[in-house]
Amino acid sequence: MGIIMNLLVTLDSNYVHQLLVMLKSISHSNPCEKLTVYIIHTRLTEFDLALIKSSFPKYSFISIVPDDEIFDGAHFTKRITKETYYRLLLCEYLPSDVDRILYLDPDTIVLKSLKPLYNHDFGDRCFVGAGHTGSIVEWFNKKRLNMNDNSTYINAGVLMINVKNFRKIFNKSDIKALIDKKGKLLFQADQDIINSLYHKYTDYVHAIQYNLDEHTYQKYKINDRYIKENTVIIHFDGKNKPWKDSYTGSMREYYDYCEKLLNNNEEKIQFPIAN
C-alpha cells in the first residue's frame, strides 16, 4: 500500500528538464507512492510550472515563491544561485501539517524505494544526510564551520528533513548572522549553513546507498551490479553532468535510462546491464 510523501525541490528554468527526469525516476521506482511536490522558486515561468504539472498528473504540485532578502549578502556563482538557499526557510513556507519532507536536488535520480529513508526514526534530530568528502577536506570543512569532531560534513543535495523537529530550533536570525559573518567563506552556500548550524541535529546514512556521486563511485570501486542491488539515489553533483557532452563520469547510463523512461514507453526500456 502506498504512502503520501512530501518532496521539496528548488530550481530555476535551467533545471526543469532535469527535474522531470528525476520525478520520472521516482514514479518508476516508487509506483505506489503518492507525492506532493513543493517547488520553491522565484524565476520559473508559468509555462515551466504547467509543463511540470502536466507531465505528472497523479502528483500534487505546490508552487512557493519566497522572500529572499535575507540572502542579499550570500555567496553566488553560476552554479550557486539564490535558489540554492531557499530551502533554509522551509519552516516559514511549508504548511503546518507537513511533519517531514525529502529534499532532492534536480540532478538526482531514484532507483529504489524511498520508504526506508522517508520513514527514518529521527528521535529529536532534524536531518538525515550522507557525506562525500575525504579526510583532508572533511577536516578543513569542520574547522572553518566550527563543527564537532564526531560530526560528518554532509552533502545536502539529498536531505531527509523532520520539519516538526526543525521548527523547534529554526531561527532566521541565526542564518542571517552566519551569512553576515562568513560571507564568501561559505563556499558551498546553504550546504555550509546546514552543516555549521545543524550538525548536532543530523543523522547519517552512507553515500553509496543514498547519495552516490562520481567521487564515491570511484572511491569504493562500485560496479553496476552493486548499484542495481543496493543504490537508492544517484547524485550528479558538481560540474560533471551526464546531459553535457563534456561528461567524463561513469554513471551516464543511469541518467540516460531515466531520461528514456520520461520520453518513451517504459516497457521497452531496459535497466543498465549489471557487470
Image (cartoon, rainbow, N blue to C red):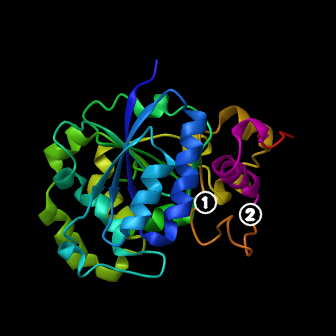
Relative to 223, is 118 on the left or the right?
Answer: left
Amino acid of disc 1: Phe
The part of the image, by quadrant, that contains residue 160 is top left
Q: How many marks?
A: 2
Relative to 112, is 11 on the left or the right?
Answer: left
Q: Is residue 262 located in the magenta-colored stretch of the structure?
A: yes
Which residue shows up at 56% across the image and 60% down it?
18
Mark nearer the N terminus (1 vs 2): 1
Task: Count neighbours of disc 1 (C-alpha within 10 A) and say few if under 14, some if 14 to 19, many if 20 or more.
Answer: many
Per the image, label 2 sits on a secondary structure element best described as loop
Could you tell me what secondary structure mostly forms the magenta stretch? helix
Q: Nearer the viewer, residue 59 or 215?
A: 59
Q: Which residues are magenta?
A: 249-270
Relative to 192, is 1 on the left or the right?
Answer: right
x and y percent of residue 222 in the render? 75, 46
Which residue shows up at 57% across the image and 68% down it?
238
- Residue matched to label 2: 249
- Residue matched to label 1: 236
Q: Is residue 118 located in the magenta-colored stretch of the structure?
A: no
x and y percent of residue 213 in the render? 62, 55
x and y percent of residue 129 in the render? 44, 46
Per the image, label 1 sits on a secondary structure element best described as loop
The part of the image, by quadrant, that contains residue 167 is top left
Residues at marks 1 and 2 touching, judged by CB atoms closer than 8 Å:
yes
